[in-house]
Amino acid sequence: MTQRNTETALPYELKRVGVLMNADPTDPLEAEGVLNPATAWGPDGELYLFPRMVAAGNVSRIGRARVVIEDGVPVGVERQGVVLSPDEGFERGAHNAGVEDPRITFIPDLGVHVMTYVAYGPLGPRPALAVSTDTVSWRRLGPLHFTYQSHLSTDLNFFPNKDLVFFPEIVPGPDGRPSFAMLHRPMWDLDWLRPGEGAPAPAGVADGRPSIWIAYVDAEAARRDLSALTSLRHSAPVAAPEMPFETAKIGAGPPPLRVPEGWLLIHHGVTGPVARGFELSHGAVYRAGGMLLDPDDPARVLARSQEPWLSPEIREETVGTLGNVVFPTAIERIAGTVHVFYGMADSAIGVAALERTAD
């Protein structure tokens, strides 16, 4: 984990725009809320939202809805059904099921939208991947696999993993090869799954709190066969909790955005208690901040926000299935303005504008 000049101020801020989507009380698939969406532009030139839809019993599906835009501002949605349900065995357990928290990155070099999502299966939250060329039909590539790295002295595939998102462009890999990079957030606690196992962090990882990691896919291999996107190599830590609004854990948000200074990553930071296993972190507070990653080495943090850019304030953010949550997951440029889409209290979906504060 290499960091430099992280005290440098980032010239960006988030300004709340409004609530984009609330759960439909007449739809049983949304009984427990809509939240944490992905976004993608369709071949028809329309912007589509892919919300996590939560039915009774905490069973999640991924929906699709056209974003209604007025004067360059997202103001609502038109629902168009479900694109992914927990139908595969790795997405279901004996008493749980879900496909959750999608992030979508369009990768022009491959000509596809790449959706990372969390499959809630028999062993808890596991990372998985699906791809699409039209944003309507999604083809599962399956669970992700992290190549064994002897210097870590553990198998990253043992651990639950969340907050997965691909960069939109090829970046230099640590081996010098052109690569596609993905951020992820492994969680070392295994005690909730198998009492007595504890939290065996990899060798060399002194801070066991959930942190942002990076992993790479050889670009040429992915061009030959998209299934190569599920095989990640050279996994390494990028950023651990550091600022006061991140004392419990951090995780990546939307796909990193290329800005003049490098890669801008909007992320969430959490304070308060951290739940184990399938439990919700009641009492925790989720806020949004940002960090700048080196364009020549995206595992290197150049700067990060010392204060949150967005904190739970309005009712939709403070009251819900899990109160006091703003959880950014998607980012799009609309009519010259960058908009960030985020989950609100695990119950609704909001929008904020990303603005530059200084040159």
Image (spheres, rainbow, N blue to C red):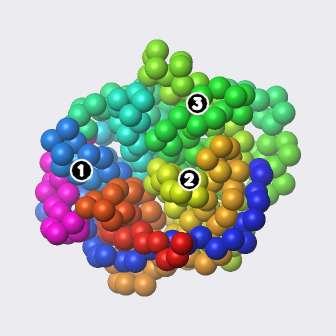
| Crowd around label 1: few <14 · some 14–19 · many ≥20 (10 Å) | many
Q: Which residue is mark 2?
A: 263
Instruction: From the image, give the main secondary structure of the stretch colored magenta.
Output: strand
Q: Amino acid at mark 3?
A: Ser
Q: Which residues are magenta?
A: 65-83
Q: Which residue is mark 1?
A: 48
Q: Amino acid at mark 2?
A: Trp
Q: Quadrant of the C terminus?
A: bottom right
Residue 284 seen in this snapshot: no
**Residue 307, placed above or below residue 233:** below
**Residue 131 locus on image (x, y percent):** 36, 31
Q: Residue at x 86, y 46 (%)?
A: 204
Q: Which mark is residue 229?
A: none
Near-viewer residue (333 or 121):
333
Q: Is residue 253 left or right of residue 7?
A: left
Near-viewer residue (327 or 122):
327
Q: Give the CA separation, mark 1 to mark 3.
A: 27 Å
Q: Which residue is mark 3?
A: 179
Q: Residue furthest front?
A: 359
Q: Residue at x 49, y 77 (%)?
A: 357
Q: Is residue 72 magenta?
A: yes
Q: Give the CA separation, mark 1 to mark 2.
A: 24 Å
**Residue 153, placed above or below residue 250:** above
